[in-house]
Structure formats: C-alpha cells, structure tokens
C-alpha cells in the first residue's frame, strides 16, 4: 500500500512546481497570499486536510478564502472535526509541507509525519473532506488544486459544498460529525427558527416609541454574505434586511466591508448622509465577522462605530440578565442552583473602555494573542465563553455541562413553554445556543442575535452605542522589508525583537494621557500593524504616526 501511495504522491506533486524563494506560513487564519502564487500551497492543503481526517477518523473542512484581503489575494484553511480551526500542533508540518522543493522531498515529509502521528494509509476508514469557497474569481481553479491534493491520498473523498460563507462550512463540518443534518437548507432553517423563537420570547411590554426600527441596512462587502442574506431574508418576519454591496457591481472588500469600516471609521461605499438615523451593519468578504455603525453627519461619511467589543458587551449583558432571572428563582428554592462560570475573551486590540466596562459588570476578562484560534480555545474553558475581536469576529460557546443543565430544566415535568419569566429565560438561552454558531464567528447568526437582543431591550442603536464611550484609537499598517523581524510577547503587547524597539514605543506612549500602543506583524497581510489609544483623537493620531515612523525607520 505504501508503495502505491508514494507513487501517487510523486506523480501528483510533480504537476505543482514550487516558486523559488516563495515562503508562506499558516498565519493567523490559514495560508494567504496573492492568488497567482497559491496553486501548490492549496494542493498541499488538500493533502494536509486528508491526513487530518485520517488522523482524527472524522470529516474535516477545507475553505478557500482570504476573508477581508483584497480581491487578488486568496487563501486556504482547514476546519477540524469540531468545526473549529485546525489544531495548532499541526501548523509546523503544514508550513514544512507547503515549502516542498521537489516531489521526493514532499513524499519524505509526508512519510516522516505520518509515521510520527501513527497515520496509516489504506485502513478501514477513509478520509472525507468538505470543500467550500467564497466568491473570489480565483476560487474555482484553486479548489481544483485542493481536490488534486486530496486525490493524492489514496481513498480520500472530497465533497464539494460549493460557494459558502466560512462559518457555514465550519458549521457543516461540526454538524456532520455529530450526525446532524447539515445542508445549506438546514443551516438557514436553524437560523430562522431560532431567531423567530428568540424574538417570540421577548417581553410583550414595548410601546411603539421604545421599539427599535425594524429595518437593518447591510453592507455585504461585495462578498459571499450578500447572496446568502437573500436566502435568510425569505424566512424571517418582524425584521427587514436591506442588503447593499451584494457583489453585483462593486469590488470585493474595496472601500466596503467590516475591515474597512472598523479600521477607517467611515461609511462604506453605498452608504452616506442619507442614512443618518438608520441602523447599519457591515460584514467582511467571507461573512465571518461584522461591525455595526450609524452615519452621524448629514454632510460627511463620519460614523459612530459599534465594534466587536460592543457586540460582546451586548451579548454579555443579555446572557447575564437571563442568568439573573434563573438565579432569583433558584434563590427562592425553585431548583438546584445553576452553577455557571461566564468568561469573556478579548485581544490587545480591544478598546480599553470596553474591558473596564465588562469588568464593572463583574465579568472575568481574559486576553489572548490575535486570531480566533486562540480566543476560541480560551473561551471553551468556561460554561459560557463569549469571545470577540474588536474587528467583529467572535461568538458564544456553551459547555456540554451547561447545555445538559438547561435541557434538564426544559424537560422538568412542570415546565411549560408559555409560562413564567423564569421559563422564558431558559427558553431564550436555548434559542441562543441554537442561533449562535458554536464552531466559529458567523456574521449572519451574530447579527440576528444582535437584532433579537435590541428588540428584547427595546434599544435603538444609539442607546446601545452609549453603553460606554470608546477611547479614541487609531490603527496603521506599515510596509517593511521583513515583517518576521518583529517578535512579540505577552499576548503581543511587547516587542522582544528588534531589541530596543519596545523602549522607543514606551517612551513615545508615555507622552500621552491614557496612552497605549503596541505593534505586531500581521498574520494575514505583509505589514506591521500599529495600534494606539489615547484620550483624544488628535493625540492618538500623532502617537500612531510617530510609532509608525519609528517602525519604518528601524525596519525600513
Ligand atoms: P492579522 O492580519 O494577523 O492582524 C487579521 C485580524 C485578526 C483576524 C485575522 C483573520 C486585526 C487587527 N487582525 O489578522 O483579528 O480576524 O485577520 O481574518 O483586525
Ligand atoms: Zn473573514
């Protein structure tokens, strides 16, 4: 068997010539680069996915996307059987594999690794990989490269799920491994059913004046979210989704989308002064993140940004409110105490004001490096773990213990689904566990949860925005010769190398009231990112500029 496997790998890899000098690593969210140089990388990702499926004995996913990157880029990432990101322990092998210089070297790498991981070929179980891609024009041909990589592991089967959002693919992998129906139709059905049930459980007290506007304007980044939202819309009531930038005319992520809106803090194309007073949301190109905003000026594109930190805060408030209702009843002796450890997880990009606010709510706040693979892992340590990056990527995770606890309550003989506020609080939590994507951040399910909660609270976007006041912040991207020259520590807040650079950043930052500043190499773009916070916008702009200048001078 091994001989046959070696021969297949030699033949298939001979068709993919590595580009001399081209180096790529798995990064924050998979491999990403200009699409024209990615064929052999995606071919290797196909092999990697097949091996991962063999190792775990379960189905895995392979998604072709470069999320918020420009349209000429593309990328590939692997979803593990749980629906989460590929185990980080496999990243060094992934990096080595994509760097193969000859078919013989590739075979050598695969043989050594499979031996170490005790993966055998031709066993009773074959590898199964679900494939998805976003709307990038390069996606189709790169998908073929992935298929060829998968086909070079004997017995491996690829199932093409077509054009999907990244979270849809992750969700499908998760459900299929639990033997739950996982077609796209099932995904849409679950979203609309849980949303309608959540909204149906809202207190019936609202007067028309406190009811938030039922129209939501959506910037779909000219990406895959646009067409999917048209499907979601069909089965929703009580909310009107108006989709703009759905990809028919504009360019993907070009002056549109969550990344643009969050970093530039201006309205995306297609939105402007005529939208003052409206609740707006922006998705990124593969619809795994979202930020809200409102246009605040009738003569400019200025916006009030409601970012991932504020989405996290809204979710945390809502969940806490439901748990408080349960707690009150438990205190009266209604049942066993609900023991629930809630934690929120952020990164250094979280606005300092949001962290203060969350701590004032009495919540435990943990920090991890950038990248949902880190946040997700940390959030999974709690009964209810809520994680969000400031850029709008996040979700809520519920532990199995918590899920069994609420299920047990619903199954109590006296439980009535139309009953007390206590019972409604339980049913709201059940609906949230079904609405929110447990595999990965998902803009479609996330925005529906925001909408349901705003209706529950009877809040306008303005009221939500006023939960706390963001500290002025600024982000810059600096092009340098070699971004890997920067090494960081302490959840990316301190530069360790080049030596001396951190001291310069510190002395610059110390000049500003409430100053905070850090730099790190991006894991998805060829830049160094600078993040700064201070008490005024003018101050923070100057701080970011001067640190950017230092970075440019040192790393040129
Ligand atoms: P990099 O390029 O490593 O900063 C960006 C985002 C991450 C994450 C990934 C994946 C910022 C500052 N960074 O990573 O949060 O979302 O892309 O798409 O927004
Ligand atoms: Zn994305």
Image: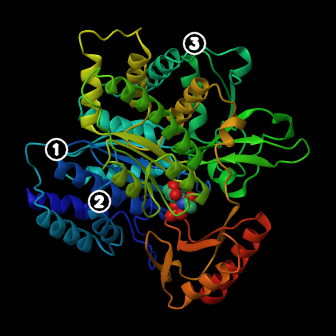
Dividing the picture into quarters, in which one does residue 187 lie? top left
Give the label, 2 or 3, closer to the camera: 3
Looking at the rendered image, the disc whose residue lies closer to the viewer, 1 or 3, is: 3
- Who's the residue at 45% across and 34% down the image? 319
| Residue 35 seen in the current view | no
Asked if residue 95 is positioned above or below residue 318 in the image, the reply reads below
Label drawn at residue 12 = 2
The tag on residue 126 is 1
Name the spot of residue 512 as percent of width and height, x first: 71, 75
Label ID, residue 113: none
The secondary element bearing badge 2 is classed as helix
Of residues 259 and 506, which is closer to you in this image? 506
Q: Which residue sits at x=24%, y=65%?
A: 10
| Location of residue 19 with respect to 28 vertically, above or below | below
Secondary structure of the residue carrying tag 3 is loop
| Residue at numbered disc 3 | 204
Left or right side of 313 for 551:
right
Vertically, is 6 above or below 408? Answer: below
Based on the displayed image, in which of its 4 quarters is residue 108 positioned? bottom left
Asked if marks 2 and 3 touch (Cβ < 8 Å), the reply is no
Report crowding for label 1: few under 14, some 14 to 19, many 20 or more residues within 10 A (C-alpha): many
Q: Quadrant of the C terminus?
A: bottom right
Residue at disc 1, secondary structure: loop
Q: Above or below — where is 265 with respect to 282?
A: below
C-alpha span from label 1 to label 2 = 19 Å
Q: Is residue 171 left or right of residue 276?
A: left
Residue at the far bottom in the pictured view: 500
Q: Quadrant of the N terminus?
A: bottom left
The residue depicted at 24 percent of the width and 15 percent of the height is: 412
Is residue 425 something that shows in the picture? yes
Chain-order first, disc 1 or disc 3: 1
Disc 1 and disc 3: Cα gap in Å? 53 Å
């Amino acid at each position: 068997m091994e001989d046959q496997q070696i021969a297949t790998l030699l033949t298939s890899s001979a068709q993919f010539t590595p580009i001399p000098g081209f180096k790529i690593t798995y990064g924050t969210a998979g491999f990403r680069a200009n699409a024209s140089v990615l064929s052999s990388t995606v071919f290797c990702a196909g092999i990697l996915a097949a091996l991962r499926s063999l190792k775990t004995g379960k189905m895995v996913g392979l998604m072709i996307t470069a999320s918020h990157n420009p349209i000429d880029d593309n990328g590939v990432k692997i979803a593990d059987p749980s629906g989460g990101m590929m185990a980080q322990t496999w990243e060094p092998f992934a990096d080595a594999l994509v760097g193969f210089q000859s078919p013989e070297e590739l075979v050598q790498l695969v043989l050594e690794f499979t031996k170490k991981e005790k993966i055998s070929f031709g066993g009773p179980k074959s590898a199964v990989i679900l494939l998805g891609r976003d709307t990038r024009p390069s996606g189709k041909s790169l998908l073929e490269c992935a298929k060829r990589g998968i086909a070079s592991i004997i017995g491996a089967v690829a199932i093409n799920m077509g054009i999907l959002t990244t979270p849809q693919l992750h969700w499908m992998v998760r459900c299929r491994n639990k033997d739950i129906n996982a077609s796209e139709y099932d995904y849409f059905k679950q979203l609309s059913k849980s949303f309608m049930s959540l909204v149906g459980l809202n207190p019936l007290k609202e007067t028309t004046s406190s009811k938030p506007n039922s129209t939501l304007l959506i910037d779909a980044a000219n990406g895959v979210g646009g067409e999917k939202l048209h499907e979601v819309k069909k089965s929703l009531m009580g909310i009107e989704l108006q989709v703009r930038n759905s990809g028919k005319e504009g360019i993907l992520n070009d002056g549109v989308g969550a990344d643009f809106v969050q970093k530039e803090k201006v309205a995306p194309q297609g939105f402007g002064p005529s939208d003052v007073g409206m609740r707006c949301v922006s998705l990124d190109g593969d619809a795994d993140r979202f930020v809200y905003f409102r246009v605040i000026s009738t003569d400019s594109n200025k916006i009030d940004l409601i970012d991932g930190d504020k989405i996290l805060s809204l979710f945390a408030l809502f969940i806490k409110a439901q748990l408080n209702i349960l707690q009150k009843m438990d205190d009266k002796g209604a049942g066993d105490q609900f023991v629930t450890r809630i934690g929120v997880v952020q990164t250094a990009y979280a606005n300092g004001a949001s962290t203060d606010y969350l701590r004032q709510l009495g919540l435990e706040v943990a920090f991890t490096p950038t990248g949902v693979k880190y946040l997700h892992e940390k959030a999974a340590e709690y009964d209810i773990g809520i994680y969000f990056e400031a850029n709008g990527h996040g979700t809520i995770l519920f532990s199995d213990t918590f899920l069994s606890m609420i299920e047990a309550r619903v199954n109590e003989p006296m439980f009535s689904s139309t009953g007390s506020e206590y019972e409604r609080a339980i049913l709201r939590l059940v609906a949230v566990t079904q609405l929110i994507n447990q595999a990965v951040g998902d803009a479609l399910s996330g925005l529906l949860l925001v909408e349901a909660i705003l209706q529950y609270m009877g809040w306008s976007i303005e009221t939500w925005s006023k939960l706390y006041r963001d500290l002025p912040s600024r982000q810059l991207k600096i092009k340098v010769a070699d971004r890997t020259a920067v090494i960081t520590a302490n959840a990316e807040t301190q530069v360790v190398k080049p030596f001396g650079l951190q001291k310069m950043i510190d002395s610059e930052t110390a000049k500003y009231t409430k100053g905070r500043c850090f730099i790190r190499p991006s894991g998805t773009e060829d830049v160094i990112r600078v993040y700064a916070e201070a008490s005024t916008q003018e101050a923070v702009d100057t701080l970011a500029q001067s640190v950017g200048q230092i970075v440019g001078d040192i790393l040129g």
